[in-house]
């Protein structure tokens, strides 16, 4: 939310899933940008993929049980779904009132191919028309759902998509051609350094994303790692240092406000939720006029006219 706020981007509307962690991310991001008033559209087609019988299990324990290669294929390959969810599974959609009228539409397990088949419907029927109206959109989603959208947007092959991972909490900014709905080249004319796949720009810089992706890979697949690398004290200090580089150190007024949060239940709860919600989600922004220089976010030039705005945003 802070990175989006410092970018100077102003959104017209938000699109997100029905999952609470994603909705909380939207709320936190909009609060940071002082844009709580814009419309927020929620739809199950933007939900994270269904991991079948693996839902609710610890990732590292699954790696220990089935092996690193098998789990990577389940998590990252194009058309290999995990084992199906049985009807008695405690997280079966039939037990959730959000899906009581659509249980028959939800598969018992999904590959990325299955996820793409539903996410692309929402993209084509809802997102694309809004973009062509000249709107600037924020899409808040989940890693594999966003991977499916980016796969479609960037034209990544089924063979290569296994190598694409996305970090949480780092917005990715695109400029789109409104006629073809394909990404325009980055200002440096290169693909991003963090994944070597994308024409979007990471708000905050490629180097930080590379470090986050390396940390997340170790967290899941390195069975010798027993601590939570994301919440470890040293890792938090590293993240704070990174945020200071991207956003600049807080002003004395901001520090005073932060100190006051200890006696402000609402503010304190917001920061607590940020830890649980925002940093557990990805931000993939497809936006106009976003520039990134040496890992820092620069304020973009004035927005072009509606006829020139070829951009969407996904978070």
Image (cartoon, helix red, strand yellow):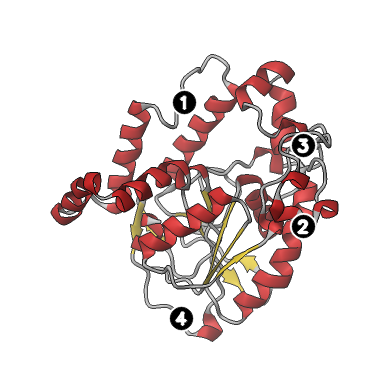
Q: Which residue is mark 3?
A: 52
Mark 2 or mark 1, which is nearer the start of the sequence? 2
Q: Specify few, some or many for label 4: CA neighbours under 10 Å numbering under 14, 14-19, or 20 or more.
A: few
Number of the label disc, if any, that sits on residue 228: 1
Q: Quadrant of residue 99?
A: bottom right
Q: Decide which of 129, 55 is in the foreground and name it.
A: 55
Give the distance between the C-alpha atoms of the residues marked 1 and 2, in whole angstroms: 33 Å
The residue located at (78%, 42%) in the rendering is 111
Of circles 3 and 2, which is in front? 3
Mark 4 or mark 3, which is nearer the start of the sequence? 3
Q: Position of residue 201 (x, y in %)?
A: 49, 56
Q: Quadrant of residue 129?
A: bottom right
Left or right relative to 125: residue 26: left
Q: Is residue 233 above or below residue 151?
A: above
Give the distance between the C-alpha atoms of the residues marked 4 and 1, in whole angstroms: 44 Å
- Please state, as top left, top right, bottom left or bottom right, where the N terminus lies in the image: bottom left
Q: Is residue 217 above or below residue 161?
A: above
Mark 3 or mark 1, which is nearer the start of the sequence? 3
Of circles 4 and 2, which is in front? 2
The residue located at (74%, 33%) in the rendering is 74
Mark 1 or mark 4, which is nearer the start of the sequence? 1
Q: Which residue is mark 4?
A: 304
Give the distance between the C-alpha atoms of the residues marked 3 and 2, in whole angstroms: 17 Å
Q: Specify few, some or many for label 1: CA neighbours under 10 Å numbering under 14, 14-19, or 20 or more.
A: few
Give the distance between the C-alpha atoms of the residues marked 3 and 4, in whole angstroms: 45 Å
Of circles 3 and 4, which is in front? 3
- Indicate the secondary structure of the residue bearing disc 1: loop
Number of the label disc, if any, that sits on residue 118: 2
> Disc 3 vs disc 2: Cβ atoms closer than 8 Å?
no
Number of the label disc, if any, that sits on residue 216: none
Left or right relative to 38: residue 300: left
């Amino acid at each position: 939310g802070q990175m989006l706020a410092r970018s100077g981007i102003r959104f017209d509307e938000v699109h997100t899933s029905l999952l609470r962690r994603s909705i909380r991310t939207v709320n936190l991001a909009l609060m940071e940008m002082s844009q709580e008033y814009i419309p927020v559209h929620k739809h199950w087609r933007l939900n994270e993929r269904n991991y079948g019988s693996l839902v609710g299990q610890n990732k590292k324990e699954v790696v220990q049980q089935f092996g690193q290669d098998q789990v990577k294929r389940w998590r990252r390959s194009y058309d290999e779904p995990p084992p199906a969810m049985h009807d008695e599974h405690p997280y079966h959609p039939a037990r959730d009132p959000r899906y009581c009228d659509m249980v028959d539409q939800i598969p018992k397990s999904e590959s990325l191919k299955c996820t793409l088949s539903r996410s692309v419907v929402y993209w084509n029927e809802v997102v694309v028309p809004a973009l062509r109206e000249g709107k600037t959109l924020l899409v808040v989603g989940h890693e594999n759902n966003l991977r499916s959208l980016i796969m479609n947007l960037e034209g990544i092959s089924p063979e290569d998509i296994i190598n694409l991972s996305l970090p949480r909490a780092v917005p990715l900014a695109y400029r789109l051609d409104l006629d073809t709905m394909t990404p325009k080249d980055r200002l440096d004319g290169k693909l991003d350094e963090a994944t070597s796949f994308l024409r979007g720009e990471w708000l905050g810089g490629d180097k930080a994303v590379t470090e986050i992706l390396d940390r997340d890979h170790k967290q899941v697949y390195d069975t010798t790692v027993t601590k939570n690398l994301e919440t470890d004290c040293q890792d938090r200090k590293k993240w704070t240092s990174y945020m200071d580089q991207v956003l600049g150190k807080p002003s004395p007024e901001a520090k005073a406000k932060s100190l006051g949060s200890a006696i402000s239940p609402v503010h304190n709860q917001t920061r607590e939720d940020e830890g649980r919600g925002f940093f557990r989600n990805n931000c993939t922004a497809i936006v106009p006029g976003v520039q990134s220089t040496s890992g820092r976010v620069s304020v973009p030039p004035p927005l072009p006219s509606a006829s020139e705005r070829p951009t969407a945003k996904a978070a």
